[in-house]
Amino acid sequence: MLLNRVVRRAGLARAIAWCGPQASREKHMSPVDLREGMALPSTWDRFYAEKRAGDFRHFDWFFGYSAVSEQLVPFVRGGARDGACHVLDVGCGTSDFGASLYRASRLPVHVSCVDFSPVAVELMERQWRERPPAPGHPSSTLRFMLADAARLGGLPGFEDGAFGLVLDKGTVDAAIRANDGGRAARRLLAEGLRLLRPGCGALLQFSDEDPDARCPWLEEAAAVAGGGPGRVAVTARELGEFRGVAYYMYVLRKQEVDDDEDDDDDDDDKKKD
């Protein structure tokens, strides 16, 4: 399987190492502990609890919002419905990514930042209360939610096709490291696609993994999650180098399914029966 291939993860490894030396000196979580437990909520609770002990600082994997702000603008515009774009930031942690979009966007945005670490969500909510960011548009909203980004079904506002833009910066990369044959990563992708509005909506995945490894995996996983081959289009864009590491933006779009195609699928099912 592609998930079991040895692929380059210099950016993720560098981000882990960046937060490791001081933690190691203070007998806190080591880079090895973090790397091996990246798919576990308990790992992130411990990671963010240690960050909470000192002065608060936003922590962004790979790069911050400013590095890709211009690339996001057309996706915000394209994903808008009724004049506003509903944005989902999966596995937000204590990143300033979603809040920065809320501050910068001149178009109304409704940003939902989701993470399964209660420590991270509490930190972000406290920052929002104590230092509320000014929205780029008076109608914009921002919320932080404690939830598993792979299991959002049943929550208000998380119906099928509810979001015009889904952002994943390092979350699937972390899930791929789980020793579960890729199930956690596939669940994350499937849930993001379920929530994505067909047609003009886009799921953006940011990673340092090369397209020759990531694109085939995305196409295979998206075909299963999206109802078959060709239902989800996958493209890759090189973002450039940040701190010596090349990064990519993977763009996933769901095709709109017309009523005639649905009827054809139903007829095929009846023939099989």
Image: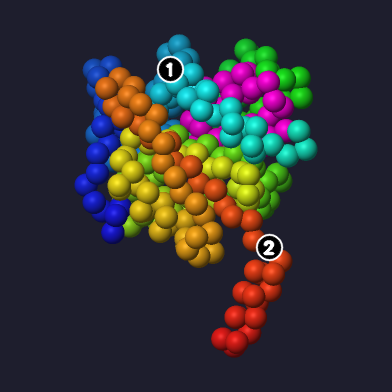
Mark linked to residue 258: 2
Does residue 107 appear left or right of residue 180 in this picture? right
Secondary structure beneath disc 1?
A: loop
Image coords of residue 174 (percent x, y): 37, 41
| Residue 10 sits above or below residue 6 on the image | above
Instruction: Give the residue at x 53% y 59%.
Output: 231
Q: Nearer the viewer, residue 127 or 176?
A: 176
Q: Which of 34 and 165 is in front in this view?
A: 165
Does residue 177 appear left or right of residue 111 in this picture? left
Choose the circle earlier in sequence order: 1 or 2.
Answer: 1
Instruction: Give the residue at x 76% y 33%.
Output: 83
Classify 10 Å Cα crowding around label 1: few (below 14), some (14-19), many (20 and above). Answer: few
Secondary structure beneath disc 2?
A: loop
Image coords of residue 223 (percent x, y): 47, 60
Asked whether residue 147 is in view, the answer is no
Instruction: Give the residue at x 48% y 30%.
Output: 93
Instruction: Give the residue at x 42% y 55%.
Output: 219
